[in-house]
Amino acid sequence: MSWNRNIPLLITLVATTTIVWVARSGSAVEPRQTVVPSAFATASTGRIGAKLDAVFTGVGSCAASNCHGGNPSNGIAGAEYSIWVQQDKHAEGYSVLLNDESKQMAKLLRLETPAHEAALCLNCHSPQRFEPTPTGEKIHGHLLGGVSCEACHGGAQGWLAEHVRWTDSTRVEDKQRFGFVDTDELWERAKVCADCHVGAPGRDVNHDLYAAGHPRLFFEFSAFMANMPIHWEVASSRERADWSERPGIEADTWAVGQLATAEAALDLLIYRAERSETQQDFKFTGHYPAGQVPPVWPEYAETGCFACHHNLASPSWRQERGFAGRGPGQYPWGTWTFPLVDIVTKQTLQRDVKSGGHSVTSLQSLMAESLPNAKEVVTRGRELQKFLQEAGRDFPRSKNSAGRSEVMLSLEQVAALRNAVAAAGPGVVKENWDGATQVYLALAALQRGHRDLRELPVSDSNDPVLKSLIDLRELLEFPADRDSPEDYSSTPIQTFEETLNTIRTSLD
Ligand code: HEC
Ligand code: HEC
Ligand code: HEC
Ligand code: HEC
């Protein structure tokens, strides 16, 4: 049996509900090419769009067979479009808005427009620039492209003509000048993904959407990279390393991803807290707005889902466990995002995320209240966000052969991170399923990165650590008919701890 990295997502990504929505007979399922609903007027795109003022030219401009639409059996370079359209889920980003799940969401929310016409959904599922461009045009085309090339590489109007002249020695700054996004740089790459997989101002999956049926967004950068079909070249000498372009990148991706995801989550928290001032003024018309989610404070989507959604048992393992710095019944905020961030900042930068004005622990205490003080959350959140941005900027980098500085942790640094996660693991898994899953994903990425740096195949199931990780994965998996852990309680937690012990003793 080979070691399949895909499973982390399978644990967590199952359809949210089994309700079958019967489509009205005769309802249109074919997308309309040009949709100009009024909801677009209030749309605001996420950061990449906002930052770069990016105008899309549409995937059609990339797809020619002598550009990116070549045959993948002749090599990946030149076949990026073909791989994306045939294998990558992003290509379906728009069409899923026409499926039963989306129709159910639109119905339950009483959305003002169908999902595939709502900026609320399109901002992530087919991000285009809806607002007037600086020259006053409104561009609505290319919606069918879903999450296409430009959603990650930047709106191409500025660089389409230029980029055919770029070579390996073209400086990144010269590409960025035209609005090209440097997905090669890990922090920037993580930010691109987080824009949709965490959310951003104007790209918001809140608890209303979850309750209506949207799958939970929980992003871990290295797992999502591992699960995206590769459309970039990996040297044949690196076949052992699956998707990764350079040695150990899976570990680097994990570490940078922890910081970048947390930074993105704070951006969203601050946005939500700032908008809470307008909560009183918001008038619900009976229809959910199709442009932006309404201001909701506090937002349950940031709180551990299974703190609320679980069976009550007696005796209760949660009461036995205690509430870790919270009063009984207070909200555990940031359970997905924050359990391991302190390890990354401590091990790689000798900085403490749990103390000082930026303390994540103080923010968590604020957010534990039933009505957190929004102003204070904004102040504290900004400090922590700044701390994380600086950590991202100062993260260890070295120069590659082309003279570019890249995140490249050494074997010793990866081992230190891995050992620290394994040591902290038992404390983290005791808290909740989210923490336990983060521990699993971390150890998977770090062990695979560690093997890669030693030029060993990254997914060898004879490796004792990887073997034990498969056991952990099984403990975390949801039962077939659930979107939550069947029984995350003291018994599985104890097994988890024992397996972590086995892992600790097999670390090499
Ligand atoms: C913040 C960005 C964002 C917004 C806003 C958003 N989505 Fe999503 N949606 C995603 C991401 C990312 C996924 C994939 C989640 C994953 O697999 O981890 C997804 C997945 C889905 C899926 C499951 C697709 C599948 O293949 O099973 C459906 C259906 C869906 N979204 C519908 C909607 C609808 C309808 C709306 C608007 C009401 C919406 N989404 C708004 C980002 C978003
Ligand atoms: C979901 C995000 C995403 C989408 C969508 C996407 N890419 Fe990429 N692309 C990446 C990432 C990540 C990389 C790997 C990092 C890198 O090399 O920049 C990459 C790498 C590439 C590379 C190789 C760059 C290099 O230096 O090796 C090309 C060419 C490319 N993409 C073209 C395309 C085309 C054409 C499309 C659309 C058909 C597309 N991409 C869609 C994220 C994306
Ligand atoms: C513009 C928004 C957007 C961006 C940017 C984006 N994604 Fe996605 N991603 C989506 C949506 C929407 C889906 C769900 C599509 C579907 O199910 O049809 C998705 C699905 C995925 C999936 C499949 C998940 C599953 O359920 O199997 C992976 C893996 C993934 N994204 C990885 C990435 C990575 C890695 C990046 C950054 C390099 C990235 N995405 C950037 C919107 C985005
Ligand atoms: C503070 C408590 C709380 C938190 C945290 C919370 N929810 Fe909910 N959720 C609720 C309540 C209350 C309802 C409404 C239940 C009802 O009407 O029966 C609900 C309803 C739902 C529903 C629809 C009802 C169902 O059982 O299918 C889903 C799905 C859901 N939440 C998912 C999530 C997800 C995913 C998260 C984490 C990202 C989350 N919730 C976090 C309180 C919470």
Image (spheres, rainbow, N blue to C red):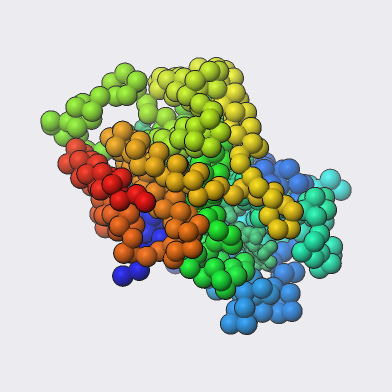
Q: Is residue 233 visible?
A: yes
Residue 497 sits in which quadrant?
top left
- Identify which residue is drawn at 44% across, 65% down: 457
In the image, residue 433 sits, relative to residue 127, either above or below, namely above
Residue 301 vs residue 476, the one in the foreground: 476
Q: Quadrant of residue 92?
A: bottom right
Write down which quadrant ligand 2 falls in: bottom right
Q: Could you tell me which residue is drawn at 59 percent across and 19 percent down?
A: 379
In the rendered image, the quadrant that contains the N terminus is bottom left
Residue 195, image x and y in percent?
59, 46
The percent position of residue 25, horizontal first and vertical second, equals 44, 67
Q: In the figure, is residue 462 to the left or right of 240?
A: left
Total number of numbered labels?
0
Q: In percent of the image, x 60 and y 70: which residue is there?
A: 235
Residue 469 drawn at (x, y percent): 32, 54
Q: Is residue 171 above or below residue 414?
A: below
Q: Is residue 56 visible?
A: no
